[in-house]
Amino acid sequence: MNTPILPPGVAAYVAAVRAHLDDLTNDEIDELTGGLEADLDDALGEVSEDGNSPEERFGPPAVYAAELRMAAGLPPRAEVRGQHGVATLWNRVGQVTGTWTERVRAHPRWPATHDFLLTIRPAWWVLRAMAATIVIRRVLFDEDFFVFVVLALAIVVSVELGRRGIARRSLVWRGTIAAGNTLAVLMMLSVGPIAFALGQEGESSYDSVPTQYESRSGLQLDGAEVRNVFPYDEQGRPLRGIQLYDQDGRLLEVGEAARESVADEEGRTFSPVPAVDADSVQRWNAFPLRRQLIAPDPASGEARAVPGGLGLAILPSVSPRPLIAGRAAEPVPTPASPVPGSSLSAPGSPTAPMVSPTTAPAPAPTAPVSSLAPSPTSSVTVSGRS
Amino acid sequence: MDTTQLLKGVLDLAVLAVVSKEDGYGYEVVRRLRAAGLSEVGDASVYGTLRRLYAAGALNSYVVPSVEGPHRKYYGINGHGQALLKEQSGAWTLFANTMNGLLASAAQPTQEVQV
């Protein structure tokens, strides 16, 4: 497409005239306004006492468009040609907004503003594609590779929609694109254009959407989900049945995401198992969490707990050194502390002592799935005391 | 008298006449009409008329690209247009003669009334 040099306002004027003809088919509009830029340009090239802006010379675009269509033998705009209910409503909306847009277009700054907006229009097309990608990503999948493929496709589609002026083609298209554009703008406002441009929406948008908070709650370390906690005593020996609270007495629980099944490196699926306290309340702040082997039922194929598959979580491969400072510190005896020997002073008072779930075996080296409890030192602490 | 009302009825004929001499693009046709004395002719009316005559099959149309400016859409008369021009010219001449006669008789009322 060549970009002819036009006096300011000619392109805008023609666009405004076309807008007043937009109840016609695209072919009719093209037929009516084809070469109009050149004609207006020529007319403006002649000195006239009327003035030099298109509005001064040719009158309001609405009047000009009406004259054009009448001379061409086309019905006036108000005369609706076999349109259905939605179209009539659309026309009525158009009449209301039309008055407003005409006022904007009549403003002396409008031609320059319009030219500027036309220049940055491709940026809008790309932004719109990004918004579409976010929607598609949220609705369909979360694979980063496909996100780029979808983004590339969305950009092509969005730019082509804009370049070919498909929005002008029919009422249905116009309505669809108007609705889509509204969605895109709302999406951009909710996500924030910068995070959006940097492609960080995965994280940042979750933070900005309160309803998503639940899934991001619970213990985290540097933004990553903490799935389990392995306490060690001052000698560096692993502890079990430890209840954790923060400074305000809130439960230091793993989040919802950490309560779901995960596969180990051998492909077996384990579901974390919370402790149950004396009030039969599941406790996700008692560590380490145990785990239950999950496998498909041979008969139904549905995933279910394997009988006898409950065991201890595998300790991380760390070997904590014995503490020297920790020994020197005088332990504060706390009557309510559920774990004797703990040097922590409990901020709240954990109400119920822990009990093992009735189906659970005693957390001892004799656990049924002993291979799941590889630590030879696992018997040094107790859990399930009552 | 409002000549724009008169013009409406004969604009087709005027445009056909102007284009029959030589092909022209929109504003050029406007210019020729004004040069011929139809100073009140509206730009958009002429463009609309050109489009309608084209749609009616009386004109040919072609686009001439321009290096510096926007492309121009030229119109030229074809066979159907020529026939239309001839027919409408005849109708106009008849009408104009009738009107002239009517007006001439109105100018000398006493003598003509006796006839």
Image (spheres, grey):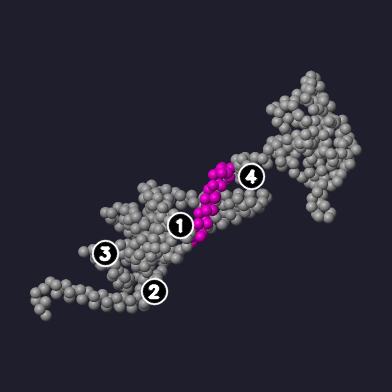
Between A385 and B17, the residue placed more toward the observer is: A385
Q: CA distance from mark 1 to mark 3?
A: 36 Å
Q: Is residue A13 left or right of residue A266?
A: left
Q: Tell me the mark number nearer the camera, choosing from 1 and 3.
A: 1
Q: CA distance from mark 1 to mark 4?
A: 39 Å
Q: Regarding mark 4 in the picture, which secondary structure is present there?
A: helix
On the image, numbered disc 1 is attached to which residue? A89
The residue drawn where x is 75% and y is 44% is A260
Q: Amino acid at mark 3?
A: Thr
Q: Amino acid at mark 2?
A: Gly
Rendering coords of residue A209 (x, y %): 61, 42
On the image, numbered disc 2 is attached to which residue? B57
Q: Which residues are magenta?
A: A170-196
Q: Main secondary structure of the magenta part?
A: helix
Q: CA distance from mark 2 to mark 3?
A: 26 Å
- Give the label on residue B4, or none: 3
Up/down of A261 relative to A278, above or below? below
The residue drawn where x is 78% and y is 46% is A263
Q: Regarding mark 1 in the picture, which secondary structure is present there?
A: helix
Q: Amino acid at mark 1?
A: Leu
On the image, numbered disc 4 is attached to which residue? A202
Rendering coords of residue B19 (x, y %): 32, 71
Rendering coords of residue A43 (x, y %): 32, 59
Q: Tell me the mark number nearer the camera, choosing from 2 and 3.
A: 3
